[in-house]
Amino acid sequence: MSTTPRAPLPHIVVVGAGFGGLAFCQKFPGKLARITLIDKQNHHLFQPLLYQVASAGLSAVDIAQPIRAIFGARPNFTVIMSAVTGFDLPGKRVLHEHGELSYDYLIVAAGGMTSYFG
């Protein structure tokens, strides 16, 4: 009896663990691809409740959750805590402070930063 070798799963790299990156990772079926989520923080901060922390209504730990805890032991899923430093689009690589990642598909969900007065 011969078995046909399975084709390797495509690799999706998701840059950013904000609302967009987390939503993609939660909704995409894990059996269809390997997913690597990369973010410089090891937690997701639920920003809509920051005012509650400022007014002592909640503690900071109430609005921040570790990224690995959100996904648990999900198969084909990896989290890397590192800052992205660049992209090699023709080579399909994400460069980060601890190395580089090759990908088949890239999701950039890095979010934005507030810039007050300049």
Image (tube, helix red, strand yellow):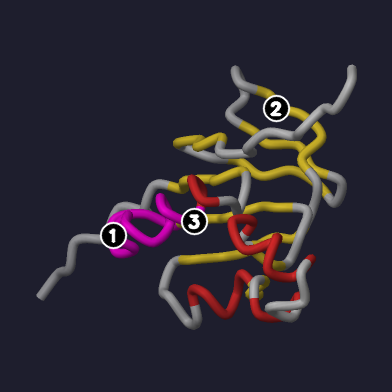
Which residue in the protein does label 2 denote? 87
Which residue in the protein does label 1 denote? 29
The amino acid marked with disc number 2 is Phe
Relative to 16, is 1 on the left or the right?
Answer: left
Range drawn in magenta: 22-34
Where's residue 99, x and y in %? 81, 47
Which residue in the protein does label 3 denote? 22
Mark 1 and mark 3 in contact? Answer it, CB < 8 Å: no
Q: Residue at x 77, y 29 (%)?
A: 86
Res 94 quadrant in image:
top right
Frontmost of labels 1 and 3 is: 3
Decide whether residue 32 is among the magenta residues.
Answer: yes
The amino acid marked with disc number 1 is Pro
Q: Secondary structure at mark 3?
A: helix
Q: Looking at this rendering, what residue extends furthest in the left direction?
A: 1
Where's residue 14, x and y in %? 54, 46
- In-front residue for pair 85/1: 85
Res 118 quadrant in image:
top right
- In-front residue for pair 109/49: 49
Quadrant occupied by the N terminus: bottom left
Q: Is residue 70 above or below residue 38?
A: below
Q: Residue at x 58, y 29 (%)?
A: 92
